[in-house]
Amino acid sequence: MQIIEIYRSIQGESSFAGLPCTFVRLAACNLRCTWCDSEYTFTGGRKMPVTEVEREITRLAPGGLVEITGGEPMLQERELVPMMESLLGRRYTLLLETSGERPLENVPHEVHKIVDVKCPGSGEGGTFRMSNLSTLTDRDEVKFVLTGRSDYEFAREFTREHHLERKAGGVLFSPAFQKDPTRERDASNCMLDPRVLAEWILEDRLNVRLGLQIHKFIWEPATKGV
Ligand code: SF4
């Protein structure tokens, strides 16, 4: 597998936010979101056999939460799916962060998928693979990263039209972060003010979770490996 980094930190997003977690960050992505904070994953990384990746996961923590992220991890589906099956067999709880563009049919059922639907402001709107909707279960979460009002309206309509509140375990609306954030560990780096987003969600009576990337409030926003 082509791996950028494997490290231990606090989960920053989703309904697992706040929990200690081992992160496995895979190299390469086929999208180019305008606000991407992981461009360092697009090239490079280290080739590691699956056995070595698993060994490193075990060394960092013998159990608990593991998030597979990237880049786009499903570009390495051939090696990744057997590795996820093996980790599940060893009773790890697995999260898979994916852009929603790659097919997800082969992801083991027990994995908690956190699936993006790219909004227009990402520059990658329309890349969501609609057949992925039928793979969602109540273990999974659908995430919209929002740059402003038009992204919010897109996310609201998509959520309603496809009954995401029923189809998935959770729906996340998260403000996008500035591409070149300051060192401030506060909401001034969000492209959409979380307070404004909270007001819109309440006004529209949406049953969605307002997501903040809490690692960017714990550490300076540009810090890598957290
Ligand atoms: S899908 Fe993720 S890694 Fe790829 S460009 Fe978008 S934000 Fe970056």
Image: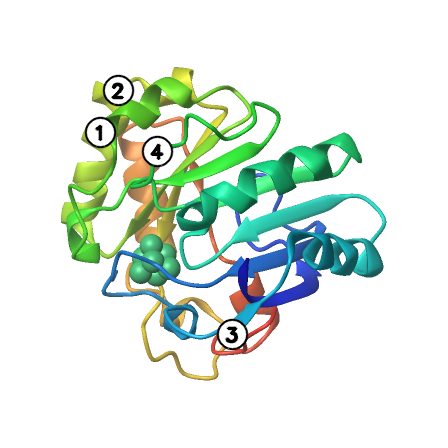
Report whether 2 appears left or right of 100.
right
Q: Secondary structure at mark 3?
A: loop
Q: Which residue is mark 2?
A: 162
Q: CA distance from mark 4 to mark 3?
A: 36 Å
According to the picture, the residue beneath numbered tag 3 turns out to be 185
Which residue shows up at 28% across the image and 23% down it? Answer: 131
Q: Earlier in the sequence, mark 3 or mark 1?
A: 1
Amino acid type for the residue under numbered disc 4: Pro
From the top left corner, tell me how far across and down residue 79 is, in percent: 54, 45
Alpha carbon of mark 3 to alpha carbon of mark 2: how far? 35 Å
What residue did someone put label 4 on?
103
Give the left or right position of residue 149, taking residue 179 as reference: left
Q: Nearer the viewer, mark 3 or mark 1?
A: 1
Q: Which of the two residues, 115 or 174, is positioned nearer the viewer here?
A: 115
Closer to the chain start, of discs 3 and 2, is 2
Circle 1/circle 2 CB separation < 8 Å = yes
CA neighbours of label 4 inside 10 A, class few (<14), some (14 to 19), many (20+): some
Marks 1/4: CA distance?
19 Å
Query: Do tag 3 and tag 2 residues touch (Cβ < 8 Å)?
Result: no
Tell me if 157 is positioned left or right of 40 in this view. Answer: left
> Looking at the image, is mark 1 or mark 4 nearer the viewer?
4
Residue type at mark 1: give it: Phe
Residue depicted at x 37% and y 69%:
42
> Which mark, residue 212?
none
Q: CA distance from mark 1 to mark 2?
A: 6 Å
Looking at the image, is 96 positioned above or below residue 51? Answer: above
Residue 10 image point, x, y percent? 67, 58
Question: Label 1: how many residues lie within 10 Å, few (<14), some (14-19) or many (20+)?
Answer: some
Residue 208 visible, this orientation = yes
Question: What is the three-letter code of the residue carrying label 3?
Answer: Arg
